[in-house]
Image: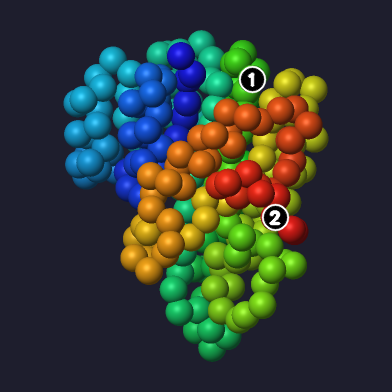
Amino acid sequence: MERILITGANRGLGLEFVRQYSDAGSRIFATCRNPETATALQALQASHPDRLSVLPLDVTDEASIRACLAAIGEQTDALDVLINNAGIFIRGERPDTLDAGAMLNVFHVNAIGPLMVARQALDLLRKGNRPRIINITSRLGSITLKQSGGNYSYCASKAALNMLTRTLSFDVRADGIIAVMLHPGWVQTDMGGQEAPLKPEESIRGMRAVIESLRPEDSGRFLQWDGEELPW
């Protein structure tokens, strides 16, 4: 039974990760900022009370991260997979609308937060079975593929996440931990919109297959939901 920590689990891709891994029999630690308002997540917990724990976590608050990992450590002695899924997106950014404070918040949630969660999870991951850190990124973070303006904060924060993950992959390699960036595709979520070609179930099935197939030599790669490697 895999032991899996998922951030941003209250909706969209995070919620579908929880649903599929719970149905597969994994032990899940699902986190979000306000569990008391996460009705869909609470319903899943009611269906899998022995395998699904829901915990509060604000990835921009180091005290919250420490408390969350301490609570997880009281329920398990190891983690096999960390899925850093929590993220935010500012719509309509143009040069004349940019706000430094808002941009910094996006960087904190999308890039720094995942690294801080991984940092606090390392002790449990070191004891895991084929431990893997999965940072959910985006092809919008690819400098090579960037061919349009706009979306400054999101694109730059995902590019930063890619670099942080790539750097982390070298530092945790000796511990047997694999760290990769995984793009879910353009998915029908609140962030992706209903015109997106992928349904959440399809994206998550694909990403689960990639996660299961990861080998040590894959650490540091920038992959997408179907296993294809993306350019930096």
The amino acid sitting under disc 2 is: Leu
Residue 44: where, in percent of width, then height?
24, 32
> Residue placed at 60% from the left, 64% from the top?
140
Q: Vertical placement of 231 versus 98: above or below?
A: above
Q: Residue furthest top?
A: 77
> Residue placed at 33% from the left, 34% from the top?
19
Q: Which mark is residue 173?
A: none
How packed mark 2 is, by other alpha carbons closer than 10 Å (few <14, some 14-19, many 20 or more), is some
Mark 2 — residue? 230
**Residue 212 falls in image quadrant:** top right
Q: Is residue 150 left or right of residue 218?
A: left
Q: Residue furthest bottom?
A: 96
Could you say which is closer to the camera, residue 224 or residue 18? Answer: 224
> Residue placed at 50% from the left, 84% from the top?
97
The answer to whether residue 152 shows anywhere in this view is yes
Badge 1 marks a residue whose secondary structure is loop
Q: Mark 2 to mark 1: distance in Å?
A: 24 Å
Mark 2 touching mark 1, by CB under 8 A?
no
Quadrant of the frame with the C terminus:
bottom right
Could you say which is closer to the camera, residue 182 or residue 93? Answer: 182
**Residue 37 falls in image quadrant:** top left
Residue 88: where, in percent of width, then height?
45, 58
Q: Nearer the viewer, mark 2 or mark 1?
A: 2
How packed mark 1 is, by other alpha carbons closer than 10 Å (few <14, some 14-19, many 20 or more), is some
Residue 121: where, in percent of width, then height?
57, 27
The amino acid sitting under disc 1 is: Arg
Residue 78: where, in percent of width, then height?
54, 15
If you read the primary sequence from the N terminus, does the residue marked by circle 2 or circle 1 appear first? 1
Could you say which is closer to the camera, residue 74 or residue 174? Answer: 174
Q: Which mark is residue 130?
A: 1
Q: Give the total of numbered labels.
A: 2
